[in-house]
Image (spheres, helix red, strand yellow):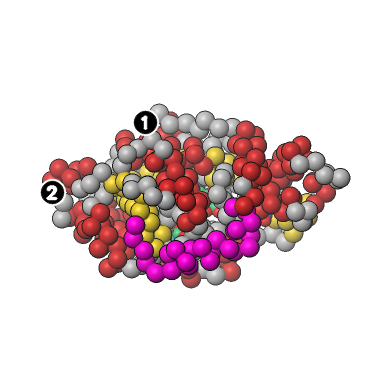
Amino acid sequence: MNPCIFVTGGAGFIGSNFILNWLSTSSEKVLNFDLLTYAGNAQNLVSLEGDDRYTLVRGDLCDGDLLRELLQTHRPRAILHFAAESHVDRSITGPSAFIRTNIEGTFQLLEQARAYWDGLNAEDKQQFRFLHVSTDEVYGSLGPDDPAFSEETPYAPNSPYAASKAGSDHLARAWFHTYGMPVLTTNCSNNYGPYQFPEKLIPLMILNALEGKPLPVYGDGQNVRDWLYVTDHCDAIRVVLERGKLGETYNVGGNSERKNLDIVHQICDLLDELRPAATSRRELIRYVTDRPGHDRRYAINASKLRRELGWSPTIQVEQGLRRTVEWYLAHMDWVESVRTGSYREWIEQNYGNRSIG
Ligand code: NAD
Ligand code: TDX
């Protein structure tokens, strides 16, 4: 094996943050395998151009031949599987891409990883890791007084997205139990921070509020999410990769439950402070038809990760939100390229065909 990690979905929100974070402290090489869908933005990693530790390959998880070739060529010591279709609203209007990428794609990746792992010598076999990145949505919805999700909470996914991620978690689990593959799984709560695509609550609200557009709050705005700043998630993944117990799952959460409406109010107030306007941004809030099957509350009990591996979140949500709003304000060029879709042209020019290097 080589000192190299194979990251899927590294041009997405969490994957980009993970790779930037990883290469800021490690000399190990990173192979980023990403289809560059609408959610994948290779420009997030433009600062790594010319860095021989970093390679981006445009490819589809469902392409087993390409995965096999890359694993044999690069011989990574670990696979970190971030790639997925990730947006709940899109899974409601078009579930098939979710079934294809999240279930079939994870299956292909597990199969190619198994063939690669089978061919390693005994020492390398022991060192190899497959880390599957997943979500708290697989556990379903909590009532106001229910205890937070633990690793023992039964699966009860409610959206096509959550069901497809639950399917992928079950596949990862089965590849450990049946084939003995060294699999680890993390189930994380809602992330936020730099490079998040503006279809998700926090960046959508920041950008709409800045442009004076309506702020669409689903239902009564009282749904609760447990928010985690993305770099805290990246640190948790590192810790699980290095010290996690094989076959185990680890819940990752921010211990920061907030109602959606409170998050939107905070964003409005931060923008009013940082970019004063004639009227308060709160006036832009509009209550809109609820998301079908909208989960009421998510909360994560991350005590296993704290107790066994010593990880806990470091950034409080108020601090993280300020940082996030400031990041978007300071990166209006990124926002512009995402809003206008010009980043797609750049991707087609640079990665139109499968490109290595
Ligand atoms: P994202 O949508 O921002 O990025 C997904 C990436 O996967 C994109 O770069 C996309 O191009 C790539 N991709 C999609 N289909 C592919 C395919 N068939 N083959 C190869 N690449 C493909 O997602 P994200 O928010 O960064 O989430 C990353 C992972 O973390 C996902 O598995 C998601 O389920 C999980 N997760 C996300 C959150 C969150 O709040 N965003 C929370 C918990 C877990
Ligand atoms: O315009 C909106 N208005 C609104 O009220 C949007 C986009 C969302 N919402 C609500 C729905 C949710 O209660 O805000 C909450 C957060 O919504 P999203 O940002 O779409 O996230 P969520 O559905 O909670 O899922 C996210 O967290 C878990 C990620 O998209 C998943 O990939 C992750 O697994």
Identify which residue is drawn at 52% across, 59% down: 39
Residue density around tag 2, few if under 14, some if 14–19, many if 20 or more, within 10 Å: few
- Tell me if 116 is positioned left or right of 311 in this view: left
- Tell me if 79 is positioned left or right of 269 in this view: left
The disc labelled 2 sits on which kind of residue? Answer: Asn
Residue 42 in picture, x, y percent from top left:
47, 56
User: Which residue appears farthest toward the right when viewing the image?
Assistant: 278
Name the quadrant of the C terminus. Answer: bottom left
The answer, for residue 150, to whether it is visible in the render is no
Q: In what element is the residue under mark 1?
A: helix
Residue 169 in picture, x, y percent from top left:
39, 54
For marks 1 and 2, the one nearer the N-term is 2
Q: Which residue is mark 2?
A: 121
Give the prevailing secondary structure in the magenta stretch.
helix
Magenta residues span 334-357
Residue nearest the viewer, comparing 338 with 170: 338
Identify which residue is drawn at 46% across, 47% down: 47
Residue nearest the viewer, comparing 283 with 249: 283
Instruction: Find residue 299 and report its image quarter.
Output: top right
Q: In what element is the residue under mark 2?
A: loop
The label nearer to you, 1 versus 2, is: 2
The answer, for residue 118, to whether it is visible in the render is yes
**Residue 3 within the magenta-colored segment of the rendering:** no
Q: Which residue is mark 1?
A: 308
Residue 256 in picture, x, y percent from top left:
59, 36
- Tell me if 280 is positioned left or right of 225 in this view: right
Residue density around tag 1, few if under 14, some if 14–19, many if 20 or more, within 10 Å: few
Q: Is disc 1 in contact with disc 2, using a CB cutoff of under 8 Å?
A: no
Identify which residue is drawn at 41% across, 38% down: 24
Identify which residue is drawn at 60% across, 58% down: 337
